[in-house]
Amino acid sequence: MVHYSQCPLCNSGNIGKYLPVTDHFLSKEGFELLKCAICGFVFTQDHPDENNINRYYESDDYISHNDSVKGFSVGLYRLSRRIMLKKKREIVFKITGLNRGHLLDIGSGTGHFISVMKKRKWMVQGIEINDKAREYSVSQRGLDVISPTVISSLPSGSFDCITMWHVLEHFQDPFGYAAEIKRLLKPGGTCIAALPNCMSFDAMHYRDYWAAYDVPRHLWHFTPATFRIFSEKTGFEIKGIRSLPLDVFYISMLSEKYKGTKLYFITGMIKGFWFYLITLFNDKKSSSIIYLLGKQTSSNNPPQTSR
Ligand SMILES: [Zn+2]
């Protein structure tokens, strides 16, 4: 168990209780979210350490790592995943300005995204901690996917783009990963990090039932403001932000399910659509946010916002 007596982001001792949350997805155990009074960072107190976290991922329903599950919500998840894969591919093409390049996907799961990029003639590599997902990527998809334990073997300055689609919030050592990403990026390269936003409209609405708290798997609960602090501390600058518009439908549906709503699918879709509409006018309140990061070249460059 990892206990914090100071803020993991700014080291202030001025931290206090923010919200008690339950692992609705799997264990039904309770956890406490703390918030730093100085920098506003929200994080999971007393979360399992790296030797004890695995059992919280041991579910057939952990769909990002499993391709054999069935069900209506999973069918919907797969449909939205296809749309998302296209969106992610377009973001990489647009942001890098490259038709071909070298891409590293950290937390590559069963390799859906890097498969898409490989078909588009990109040189791709993946990093995946889950043994089954990694072996599947290699044996069934013919991808080059390695364990995070050997990330240091990758040559410095070798990637045009490094992607992390909803993975940084799972890492026990996000600062260590940020240092590795900085080392691995080519000069002018871009890191694309997608993260849930715990100050989103849907997070405020669902409170402890908000599915993207996903404790204890999610250790860090970033906002645009706290991720900016994290970026600056780790030697990056935020070059822009984008939203992942479909995430809010999935998160709303799942949150309604956790609340026990009988018509959770319909209710989640209706509310998701409402959250989607109101974030058209304020994308910093989106359910999840994609941050476009470059290595720091100068300070005080404000991030640009566009959809
Ligand atoms: Zn702090």
Image: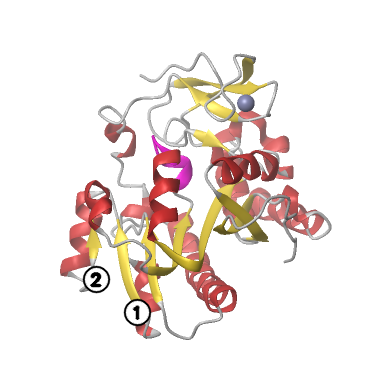
Task: Looking at the picture, tell me which residue is in the foreground, 84 or 166.
Answer: 166
Q: Which residue is drawn at 38% across and 54% down?
A: 64
Residue 172: in magenta span: yes
Q: Look at the numbered disc 1 and give the secondary structure of its residue.
A: helix
Residue 91: in magenta span: no
Q: Look at the numbered disc 2 and give the secondary structure of its residue.
A: loop
Question: Is residue 152 shown above or below 141?
Answer: above
- Asked whether residue 262 is in view, the answer is no
Q: In which quarter of the image is ligand 1?
A: top right
* Amino acid type for the residue under numbered disc 2: Leu
Q: Which residue is drawn at 35% across and 19% down?
A: 1
Highlighted range, magenta: 168-174
Q: Which mark is residue 44?
A: none
Q: Which residue is disc 2 drawn over?
A: 143
Mark 1 vs 2: CB contact within 8 A? yes
**Residue 229 % position (x, y):** 63, 40
Task: Looking at the picture, tell me which residue is in the foreground, 208 or 226.
Answer: 226
**Residue 180 % position (x, y):** 38, 50
Question: Is residue 5 shown above or below 139?
Answer: above
43 relative to 243 in the view: left or right: left
Task: Looking at the picture, tell me which residue is in the foreground, 37 or 49.
Answer: 37
* Amino acid type for the residue under numbered disc 1: Lys
Q: Which residue is disc 1 drawn over?
A: 118
